[in-house]
Image: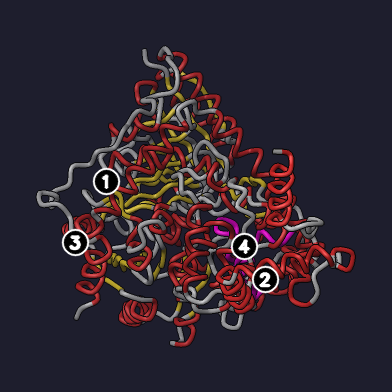
């Protein structure tokens, strides 16, 4: 994966480029609409969905309010069960820890379960620089890795690829990474899955080190949970001798019982299934079952900055189901790459600027990558009010300077409002020149008026009209 | 300062001051959601499990204890497996009619060797009717987690009394300290155009024997 997002253009520019790609738009429209309807049916099966959603929100909020306490409890439980816990304040430290752990095993290749956290810290690139090859084993991640592409969706990173593009990537690139694709491979999804099975099996059987993330960590027991479909997760979590899990600190939940909520809401929200095909749970190490060396790397990397913002911290409730991407009209048209981050779509628009700050052009533009329609909030299984956080982050962007033109316009307006005579003269001038007004704004305002009508100027300013009304009344008396 | 201390300090700073007495926080969650969805008799629960398993492409066979061994032997023969692997604690009774070589899992069984077996036969910890899920928790009749992963054909035996209605009922019965695998149908993927395709890395054939209580 060429995972660098450096030099990404701001969202509007990247979105404009994506909109010109008809194949991309067709692929996204097809995939998001398929899953949207299925999700609605899976959710409708549970008549207590609203209560499950509320419980999930409360569990996450409570955990965040006591995050230090639960992380310490988790550390104690994992350690007692035979695991080793490491803490990483940032991506660089997490990469260093993982690299050192892999080097200590003497291995030069690792198999990976799909993990947002390791994408976020760009672990694969760091391992490659240290001479360690990381093989992605999730089908969509494999498509992205083989295609030297970037992920565009949280759940299905290759959602921007259709079946015939996937067939071409497999045919052209599998041989470079290992076992080539079978002769005469067609674009039937079942055949493509079979090709992935054959390509990866050899890697699973010889792997000594596995790297994963986790969907949940249970503080009271030290149990980690990985939810998946294909079985590649099970392969990476059980066959190697050493397992390294890199997990964001917000993934902790207090009790075992809390899982009864999320194991109902996550599968239905993400793949629209009653339950995903495979869920693995492990607590430290177990004699004769799975890796005998287990390392848990707890990752901050901007999460505590997010926690410090009372409005924005609700983004940390996210369980990465991706339902908000699938319903978003902006995501459906612009695609995931335009967001310039491993977290695209509505959740990405509020998570990325909080994790990375709003100093770069692309990050400052993300809170504006939304029409605030609210569909994302409706489907969120932990009730993150994404529009509220978007508006809040827009305030932050404006406070740090905002757009130059907007600043100039605002200070001109402030001056005019401070000088009533100037304001009145300006208004009269505007009314008298009505016929000369263009229907679209010139210069930088042009894009705005491309899709909007300019408000008409009345033939007389309100103050003049009011004065005249008062005058007529006076005459009548 | 260590990264550990740095992260903990940042969290405490972000949260501000907390009222005293919250070092051991009570966990006040309103659990008003359903303990199970709808009322069902045990027979209806079993019927629902059969339905949900089949909807996710598992093959379900309903049987009685006296006929289970015969059925197991037939399923192995139909798959044409030459070698069958079983966990150390699976009762011999279930295997007595199997016509090919049977091996019990031992501590030195490697993944590569496991890949040479055609079928694996196990019991389970419990099954969840509403979601069509079988839970394995590595007890002696189930073996280690990899046992049910590498062979392409998994035969799983579920006794009717092991069936629960819902996810909350399952969570209440299970012990989190055991390594666990929750299985809902054969391995599948939604990665191509967000459509479910069966058959990726896990067993592509899942036969479930639902054995009636006598």
Which residue does the numbered mark 2 point to in the structure image? A180
Q: Residue furthest left?
A: B21
Q: Which marked residue is nearer to the observer: mark 4 or mark 3?
A: 4
**Residue bearing mark 3:** A79
Chain of the residue displaying label 3: A
To the question of a shared chain for discs 4 and 2, the answer is: yes
Give the x, y percent position of residue A436: 88, 68
Q: Secondary structure at mark 1?
A: loop
User: B40 above or below A320?
Assistant: above
Q: What is the crowding at mark 3: few (fewer than 14 residues within 10 Å), some, or many (at least 20)?
A: some
Question: Which residue position is annotated with label 4?
Answer: A369
Residue at image coords 85%, 63%: A434
Residue farthest to the right? A435
- The reply to whether discs 2 and 3 touch (Cβ–Cβ < 8 Å) is no
Labels 4, 1: front one: 4
Sequence order check: which comes first, mark 4 or mark 3?
3
Cβ–Cβ below 8 Å for labels 2 and 1? no
A202 on left or right of A440: left
Figure check: A296 above or below B71: below
**Left or right: residue A64 compared with residue A204:** left
Q: What separation in Å lies between label 4 and label 2 (alpha carbons)? A: 40 Å
Could you give the CA–CA distance between mark 1 and mark 3, rounded to whole angstroms? Answer: 16 Å
Residue plotted at (33% across, 36% down): B90
Q: State which region is magenta.
A: A139-162
Q: Secondary structure at mark 4?
A: loop
Image quarter of the N terminus of chain A: bottom right
Q: Residues within 10 Å of mark 1 (few under 14, many from 20)?
A: some
Q: How far apart in space, not on screen, are marks 2 and 3 (Cα)?
A: 42 Å
Q: Position of residue B49 (x, y in %)?
A: 49, 25
Question: Which residue is tagged 1?
Answer: B178
């Amino acid at each position: 994966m060429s995972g660098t997002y450096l030099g990404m253009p701001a969202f509007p520019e990247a979105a404009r480029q994506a909109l010109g790609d008809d194949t991309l738009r067709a692929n996204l429209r097809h995939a998001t609409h398929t899953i949207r309807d299925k999700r609605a049916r899976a959710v409708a099966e549970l008549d207590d969905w609203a209560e499950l959603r509320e419980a999930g929100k409360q569990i996450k909020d409570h955990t965040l309010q006591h995050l230090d306490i639960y992380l310490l409890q988790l550390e104690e439980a994992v350690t007692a069960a035979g695991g080793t816990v490491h803490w990483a304040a940032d991506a660089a430290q997490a990469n260093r820890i993982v690299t050192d752990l892999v080097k200590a095993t003497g291995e030069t290749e690792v198999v990976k379960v799909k993990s947002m956290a390791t994408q976020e810290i760009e672990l694969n690139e760091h391992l490659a620089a240290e001479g360690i090859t990381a093989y992605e084993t999730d089908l969509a991640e494999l498509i992205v890795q083989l295609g030297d592409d970037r992920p565009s969706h949280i759940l299905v990173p290759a959602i921007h690829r259709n079946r015939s593009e996937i067939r071409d990537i497999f045919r052209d690139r599998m041989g470079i990474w290992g076992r080539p694709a079978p002769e005469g491979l067609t674009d039937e999804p079942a055949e493509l899955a079979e090709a992935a099975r054959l390509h990866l099996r050899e890697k699973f059987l010889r792997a000594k080190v596995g790297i994963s993330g986790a969907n949940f960590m249970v503080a009271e027991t030290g149990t980690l949970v990985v939810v998946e479909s294909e079985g590649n997760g099970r392969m990476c979590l059980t066959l190697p001798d050493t397992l390294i899990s890199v997990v964001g600190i917000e993934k902790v939940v207090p009790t075992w019982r809390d899982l009864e909520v999320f194991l109902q809401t996550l599968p239905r929200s993400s793949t629209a299934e009653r339950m995903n095909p495979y869920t693995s749970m492990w607590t430290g190490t177990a004699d004769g079952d799975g890796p005998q060396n287990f390392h848990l790397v707890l990752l901050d990397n901007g999460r505590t900055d997010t926690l410090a913002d009372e409005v924005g911290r609700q983004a940390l409730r996210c369980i990465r189901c991706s339902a908000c991407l699938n319903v978003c009209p902006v995501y459906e048209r612009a695609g995931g790459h335009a967001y310039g981050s491993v977290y695209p779509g509505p959740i990405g628009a509020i998570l990325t600027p909080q994790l990375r700050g709003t100093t770069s052009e692309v990050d400052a533009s993300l809170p504006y990558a939304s029409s605030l329609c609210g569909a994302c909030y409706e489907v969120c299984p932990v009730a993150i009010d994404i529009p509220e956080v978007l508006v809040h982050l827009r305030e932050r962007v404006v406070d740090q300077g905002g757009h130059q033109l907007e600043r100039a316009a605002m200070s001109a307006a402030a001056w005019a409002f401070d000088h009533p005579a100037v304001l009145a003269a300006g208004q009269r001038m505007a009314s008298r020149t009505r016929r000369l007004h263009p229907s679209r704004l010139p210069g930088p305002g042009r894009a705005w008026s491309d899709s909007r009508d300019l408000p008409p100027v009345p033939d007389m300013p309100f103050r003049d009209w009011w004065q005249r009304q008062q005058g007529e009344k006076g005459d009548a008396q | 300062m260590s990264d550990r201390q740095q992260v903990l300090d940042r969290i405490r700073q972000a949260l501000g001051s907390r009222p005293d007495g919250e070092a051991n926080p009570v966990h006040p969650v309103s659990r008003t959601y359903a303990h199970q969805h709808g009322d069902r008799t045990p027979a209806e629960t079993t019927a629902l499990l059969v339905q949900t398993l089949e909807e996710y492409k598992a093959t379900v066979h309903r049987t009685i204890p006296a006929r289970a061994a015969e059925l197991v032997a037939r399923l192995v023969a139909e798959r044409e497996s030459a070698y069958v692997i079983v966990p150390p604690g699976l009762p011999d009774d279930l295997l007595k009619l199997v016509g090919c070589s049977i091996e019990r899992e031992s501590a030195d069984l490697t993944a590569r060797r496991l890949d040479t077996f055609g079928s694996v036969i196990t019991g389970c910890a419990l099954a969840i009717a509403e979601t069509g899920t079988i839970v394995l928790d590595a007890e002696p009749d189930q073996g280690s987690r990899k046992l049910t992963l590498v062979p392409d054909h998994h035969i799983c035996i579920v006794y009717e009394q092991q069936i629960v209605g819902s996810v909350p009922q399952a969570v209440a019965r299970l012990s989190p300290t055991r390594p666990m695998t929750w299985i809902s149908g054969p391995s599948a993927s939604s990665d191509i155009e967000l459509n479910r395709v069966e058959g990726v890395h896990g067993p592509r054939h899942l036969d479930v024997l639902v054995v009636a209580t006598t």
